[in-house]
Image: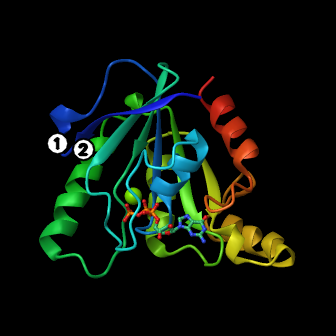
């Protein structure tokens, strides 16, 4: 898989809408969206990863195999960002999802260790409302014992009322990579 950074969008006229399929990665701030993109593409420093939540503030586009895009969205739910920043981000997201025909597939990134938040449920609702198919991954599964994973996945599936199984993933050790990549590839066929 080849992957390269293309551009960073802060406004609607910067969104890429060139007819290529687009996979969007959404999820809470710090849940590991950018790390997941790096792990899936095998490029360590493609998307910026941070210890401070709120590292990604624009929609960042990566061209994959010269064929389709991964779009890395800024994370939601970080309490310490300013009110103005939250409004800016809500407006950006609203315009981004206002034209769902440009979004082929969503990847909702959740944290394997936690019950999804109300904002995660809203995000799932946004995909449903816009009729954008999406898969859900439970990242940071390396932080759980293998024996804890099935119940953790069930909690996420039940909380978000998902029709299909949540895929466990770890961008730290690569667990689940093959399954998630194949779900993405079949989701954009
Ligand atoms: N243990 C573990 N840590 C992870 C994993 N994925 C990401 N992290 C760590 O979580 C932190 C946040 O990762 P990012 O990829 O920047 O998260 P993000 O969702 O893009 O964050 P924003 O851009 O702020 O929305 C970093 O310190 C990562 O190293 C994982 O699977 N396991
Ligand atoms: Mg990020």
Q: Give the quadrant of residue 103.
A: top left
Q: Is residue 17 above or below residue 129?
A: above
| Residue receiving disc 2 | 95
Contact (Cβ within 8 Å) of mark 1 with mark 2: yes
| Residue receiving disc 1 | 11
Q: Secondary structure at mark 2?
A: helix
Residue at the image position 63 percent from the left and 37 percent from the top: 184
Quarter holding the C terminus is top right
Measured from the top left, where is residue 185 in percent x and y? Answer: 65, 30
Residue toward you, 32 or 84 = 32
Q: Secondary structure at mark 1?
A: loop
Q: Is residue 25 left or right of residue 145?
A: left
Residue labelled 2 has its Cβ within 8 Å of some atom of ligand 1: no
Q: Is residue 147 above or below residue 129?
A: below
Q: Given the current orientation, which residue lies at the most extreme bottom position?
A: 80
Q: Given the current orientation, which residue lies at the most extreme front position?
A: 44
Q: Given the current orientation, which residue lies at the most extreme left position?
A: 84
Residue at the image position 26 percent from the left and 81 percent from the top: 80
Q: Residues within 10 Å of mark 2 (few under 14, many from 20)?
A: some
């Amino acid at each position: 898989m080849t992957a390269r950074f293309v551009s960073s969008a802060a406004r609607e006229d910067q969104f890429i809408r060139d007819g290529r399929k687009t996979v969007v990665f959404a999820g809470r701030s710090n849940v590991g969206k950018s790390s997941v993109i790096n792990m899936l593409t095998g490029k360590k420093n493609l998307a910026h990863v941070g210890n401070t939540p709120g590292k990604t503030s624009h929609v960042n586009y990566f061209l994959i195999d010269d064929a389709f895009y991964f779009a890395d969205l800024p994370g939601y739910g970080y309490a310490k960002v300013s009110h103005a920043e939250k409004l800016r981000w809500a407006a950006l997201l609203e315009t981004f999802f206002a034209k769902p025909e440009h979004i082929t597939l969503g990847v909702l990134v959740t944290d394997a260790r936690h019950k999804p938040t109300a904002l995660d449920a809203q995000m799932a609702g946004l995909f449903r409302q816009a009729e954008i198919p999406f898969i859900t991954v439970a990242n940071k599964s390396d932080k759980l014992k293998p024996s804890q994973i099935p119940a953790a996945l069930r909690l996420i599936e039940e909380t978000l009322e998902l029709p299909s199984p949540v895929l466990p993933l770890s961008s730290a050790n690569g667990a689940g990579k093959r399954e998630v990549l194949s779900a993405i590839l079949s989701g954009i066929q």
